[in-house]
Amino acid sequence: MESRHGRKKEQAESPEVLKAREEKEAVLVREYLALKDSLKELIESNKRDNDALKVTTALLRKSPDYYTIWNVRRTILKEGFLDNADDETANKIYTGELEFVQENLKLNPKSYWMWNHRRWCLESMSQPRWDKELAMVGKFLEMDARNFHGWDYRRYIIRQLDLKDKEAKDKVLERAQSEFDFTTTKIHQNFSNYSAWHNRSTLLGKLAEDLSAEEREATVDNEFDLVKNAIYTDPEDQSAWLYELWLIGRGMTPLKAGYVANIYKAQLTNTDLLKTIEERSISILGAYVISFHPLEIVVAFDETIEMRNPFTVSTRVEHVAIPLEGEWKATGSDSELGSLWIFQQAPGAVYGPTVEVVIFSDDVCAVRAGSKLPAAVCYELETLNQNLEDISGRLGRLVIGQNLMYDVTKRIGPVTRPDGTLETQVVNPKHRVTSLTESNSLDDRVALLKREISAVRELVELEPDCKWPIQILSTLLSELRKTISIHSTQAKLIDDECIELQEKLITIDPLRQERYEDRRTQLVFDRETLSIIQDSKRFPEIEFAVKQPSNLDLSMRGLTHIPISSYLLHLHTLNLDSNSITSTRFLRNLLNVRRVNLSNNLIERLEGLQHAPSLEFLTLENNMIAKWEDVVAGFVFWGEGKLGRTGGHVKVLLGNNPVVVNEGGEYVLEKRWEDVGEVGVEIQWQSEELRLAEEAILAAGGEI
Amino acid sequence: MLAEPAMATTQGTTTNKQPSGPTFQREKHIQYFKRTLQMLPEPYTSQDTFRMTLGLFAIGGLELLGVLEEAISEANRKAWIEWIYSQQRIPSKDSPSEDDDALYGFGGPFSGLAFQENTDGRQNLGCECDSHTTPYDTAHLTMTYTALLSLIMLGDDLSRVAKEPILKSLRKLQQPNGCFIPCITDYEPDMRFVYCASAVSYILNDWSGVDKPALLNFIRESQTYEHGFAQSPRHEAHGGTTYCAIASLGLMGGDAFLDQRTIVRQEGETESAFEERRARAGFVDLEGTRRWCLQRQTTGFQGRTNKPTDTCYSFWIGGAVAAIGSFDLVNFECNRGFLMETQHKAFGGFGKWVDTYPDVLHSYMGIASLALMGEPGIRPLEPLLNISKRMQERLYNETVFWK
């Protein structure tokens, strides 16, 4: 450890050593207090002479961060010496101060106030020698190449010089070039000097301002070469990798997978349709009626949103649209946030033959940074035929308990806002190719990404256990994936590769394991649910595919959570056996699900069950549910009908959970069932395997 | 989406968030902080001005360790309160003029005002001053912040704090670019004082001393391309300043924690209304900040890219990650393991590095980071104010500016 920090290891100190040390300290403290007293006297005496100055000198040597002393010193200098001095004398005094600071800086390179005093001198001098300062700080950075005071000060000097040359742009550029060369030198001395890389990024933007497109490209190519040079020298060092990411730029990072592909397609046919790519879009996956009496409508989003204003629901009575009263709530007990929102008509409200739901961009606020609803969406519903059995919608008939769910909607837009203005789409056709270059064609971006991907891939093959190239490769692949259709073979190959990369990272970089697990779960989930969604005609969004699978097998996928549970809205059967899932909260969005297998996961508590109105069979064997309260928690709102379940039969298998042993077995638990009342829940404490075995014995005429 | 604790798929494994391995030397740390309060050892004489700050760390350390009231007697707590108030600079009765250059708030103990026992039973209000009597030894923003926190912890209700003069001084200290300097004579506006100004405003429950849009703008401009925050624009991202920036945003509340990219001009919205809305967002890239912070974990945390791991960044970075609600993504085991190595086995306290002499700042920061991880024997910590949750409640319920 000590060699890494370049510090001497301290010996364990004996009591004698400690005592001696304390005595020595006491002497120092006494000396210091004496000096302080003399300073106090000094201030009270209003002396402005050499003796006074000497007292401050002595104190500052001991206590460089004592701002009061610096202030006193400046006053003594100003009033006692500088105010009546000619230019030459003043210059001498300031130079003396600079020397005083410089000598002390060597001992205390991190003292803010010393650097401040230096600035005061230079800014007060009639002819400050900034060039000398630059040389001084250059030397300083030779001693400690990472001292941020040094780098900050260097930038400060350059700023002062640039201010002087405000009118002479060539001089400013020349200086920027020379600073740029300085970073090159520093980087070549030591590739891991991130301070130098950082400064380089601030200079490069300035230098590129007046360059032609070709010159910029050449500049960027040079930078990529420098990066290659660094990463091949030491791939374990992150400095150059960070700089590479800066070069490539992240203009498109906020987008969701597949969105750029849509933009890309549109660009080939109709540039006017091109939307801004700086923003990530929220998609509405679909809207459905789940009940007519009272009217209930569910709207599914592809991420968690907060409702800023209630979505507008209106009905037409004799060609006049009038608002339909009712309440919007997200599923689940905390109704403020959610990806699934349910409208319930107010008791007594009357609706006509058509009902319209309009969701304006402003109504929706994404919880995840960077997302917004790109344009208002309107859903129209015809209510003339209210026999849910007869209506065939896009999704066919989906049974929810007694109800039917069907697709009654057709999306229309753009729509008129309440104030009469039209919501339209924003157009922005320029793409950033790198941080410094841009182009009208996405092909340039794709070409750059492909080139860098193949370069990094080579390095990953050479250094398979090095975490940085793997992370960069994964980032670049994700960027590339955004430019192709989510259902293409290439996208699938990228997904598979990215998942493998995350798995590799989990094994070689345990410090960020949870982050990689998170990412891996997201990627696996995206891959496994591809058949559920499709590109929307209203790009750059996605929506539910016309044909929905009713069963989904996600067993043994290593999932830690369900990233977007609204995707699973239409499923009847879901198998999540043998994952690492810790919460059942996602069940609240599975309005249609009847059978869920969550055996062999890491669940400690039942949650969200009351909002899974169709659930009939839930397997939770081999989880970590340890207390009776954690079982009951799943049913507390059961029967209250909070847009959820009002009853019905459900069977829950809880075999091989610690709760069975902890709470004293079947008998006690059955008695305590009174705690939740009669809600039609049947719990099987015995494991299914054991039950089947017993059944077989009984069937064979045996005894248990 | 925050990850749940990572665990193997096999059953029966316990969560890796439970502390295990080397022992946390709680008793020794308590002794360490007690010693610190009694005598400031030699390494700190160079920081005499910051005695207030060092006192805060010792008091705060004892509070986090759950022994504040038993370690400092009531009489001593009262004496501490009086000493702190004796460092308050309040306007002189004779010259409360508007153009007064003096700076109010709390300062270092040099003003020539030694702490005097209250012989006549009057409460100490502080040192009456104006620009003529104290041109050198003005109030200092950092010390105003630490004085207020210390007073809360010592059980004072802040009723003697001169709020209006402090707010007036804040207005003077904010620079045209939105940043703050700590006192008039300083030359270096930076993020540390942005945090102090935010915390002071929060504690006084009054933001009228701060131009919030300008402050937000300064914070945003200081976000670097790696998405950490620097001391001021164009500089390199740094763990301490990243904490200061994020915690300031959190204290400002409202839309300050939003990512600027979420705010898009709406059809029909005027340019100025849109700009105003955007100006209230605090981040250029929140997700990027999260990534940068987590990349700083080595075992404990480093303060900048490719710098050595240092105890205090377990809090500076850890606190920043906690403030944006992602502390679960930190590897607890390794961070704790590092901190167990930097605690001094014999004397208590924490050093900067393994086998370095402990100091009070690193001792406090080490314990604060352990508090974020739920270490037994440490009180829960509120990351934005860097104070125990118990004391945060006291601020809300028992101080004059909040109750």
Image (tube, coloured by chain):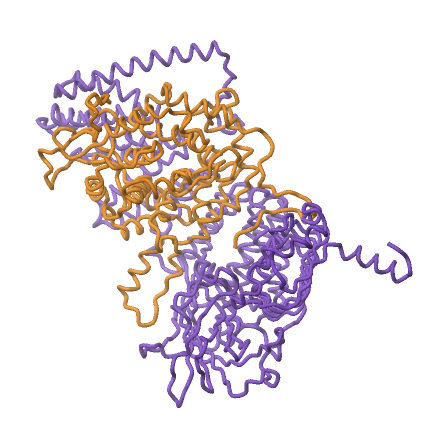
Q: Is residue A418 left or right of residue B318?
A: left
Picture mark count: 0
Depicted A206 relative to depicted A14: above or below:
below
**Is there any visible trace of residue A129 in the rendered image?**
no
User: Which x, y percent locates residue B107?
Assistant: 25, 31
Q: Colour of chain A?
A: purple
Depicted A86 relative to depicted A621: above or below:
above
User: Which residue occupies the foreground of this view, A126 or A149?
Assistant: A149
User: Which residue occupies the foreground of this view, B142 or A245?
Assistant: B142
- Residue at 34%, 41% (x, y): give it: B395
Name of the residue lying farthest toward the bottom: A318
User: Which residue occupies the foreground of this view, A617 or A661?
Assistant: A661
Q: Colour of chain B?
A: orange
Q: Quadrant of residue B315?
A: top left
User: Which x, y percent locates residue B401?
Assistant: 28, 43
User: Which x, y percent locates residue A552?
Assistant: 67, 66
Depicted A574 relative to depicted A504: above or below:
below
Q: Is residue A500 left or right of residue A243?
A: right
Depicted A598 relative to depicted A551: above or below:
above
The C terminus of chain B - image quarter: top left
User: Which x, y percent locates residue A501?
Assistant: 61, 52
Name of the residue lying farthest toward the right: A701
Q: Is residue A330 left or right of residue B154?
A: right
- Residue at 32%, 15% (x, y): give it: A29
**Is there any visible trace of residue A641 in the rendered image?**
yes
